[in-house]
Image (cartoon, coloured by chain):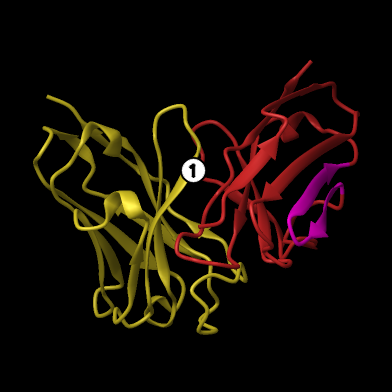
Amino acid sequence: EIVLTQSPATLSLSPGERATLSCRASQSVSSYLAWYQQKPGQAPRLLIYDASNRATGIPARFSGSGSGTDFTLTISSLEPEDFAVYYCQQRSSWPPFNFGPGTKVDIK
Amino acid sequence: QVQLEESGGGVVQPGRSLRLSCAASGFTFSSRAMHWVRQAPGKGLEWVAVISYDGSNKYYTDSVKGRLTISRDNSKNTLYLQMNSLRAEDTAVYYCYCGSTGSGYYLEWGVDYWGQGTLVTVSS
């Protein structure tokens, strides 16, 4: 089973700052990794799929990179609506289609 | 527009059963793999199960094998999760989810359809 770890657990930043979130897989997932955003009381929303492709309607300030075991989600300049929890998920080796434990981006 | 609407959640005693439903509309349900994902209060997302477009193949996370059963009725555009022998650790919001365009992959993130979730609380 592939295990995903995310760091940091919490990222405290101000609007306008750059956010860099990490997801590491216990073994290679090639590029089969996605990033989701979740706000309180809402279902998750897909941001990035296959490591670097923005999902439909996702602003250009969100970008993803990486392959193999190390991945990064970058938010170039935080907007007020970007403060949320972010999860990675893999589809390389399943079941299960594991999620990472999440990174909370909160307002400094 | 695409809609996934879960129902059937509630409070149930440990060891009892519950069946969740997810009514789908606005897309070709019968050609898509479907998933259940859960989230315990204040915790992260946990993938639970997936079923193939025709119901012939089903896969589960280890912690629910033998207790939770995913199924579907394509004539009713409805996904189900039969939950037996419930435990306190099954307490969560349960989401139905579709991440397949009908390409044959169980998940390829070509679409991103989520329900609003239904809360299951297992407590005596």
Q: Is residue A29 left or right of residue A101?
A: right
Q: Colour of chain A?
A: red
**What subunit carries mark 1?**
B
Quadrant for the C terminus of chain B, please.
top left
- Residue in front for this viewpoint, B27 or B102: B102
- Residue B111: image location, x then y, percent: 59, 68
* Residue B39 vertical position relative to residue B114 in the rendered view, above or below: above
Magenta run includes residue B38 = no
| Residue at 55% in and 77% down | B101
> Based on the displayed image, in which of its 4 quarters is residue A51 positioned?
bottom right
Tag 1: amino acid: Leu
- Residue A68: image location, x then y, percent: 75, 62
Q: Main secondary structure of the magenta part?
A: strand
Of all residues, the one furthest to the top in this rendering is A108
- Residue in front for this viewpoint, B19 or A25: A25
| Residue at 35% in and 67% down | B59
Q: Secondary structure at mark 1?
A: strand
- Residue A107: image location, x then y, percent: 75, 19
| Residue at 38% in and 45% down | B117
> Based on the displayed image, in which of its 4 quarters is residue A7 positioned?
top right
Q: Residues within 10 Å of mark 1 (few under 14, many from 20)?
A: many
The residue beneath circle 1 is: B45
- Residue A85: image location, x then y, percent: 63, 34
Q: Which chain is yellow?
A: B
Q: How many marks?
A: 1
| Residue at 56% in and 46% down | A44
> Which residues lie in the magenta part?
A61-75
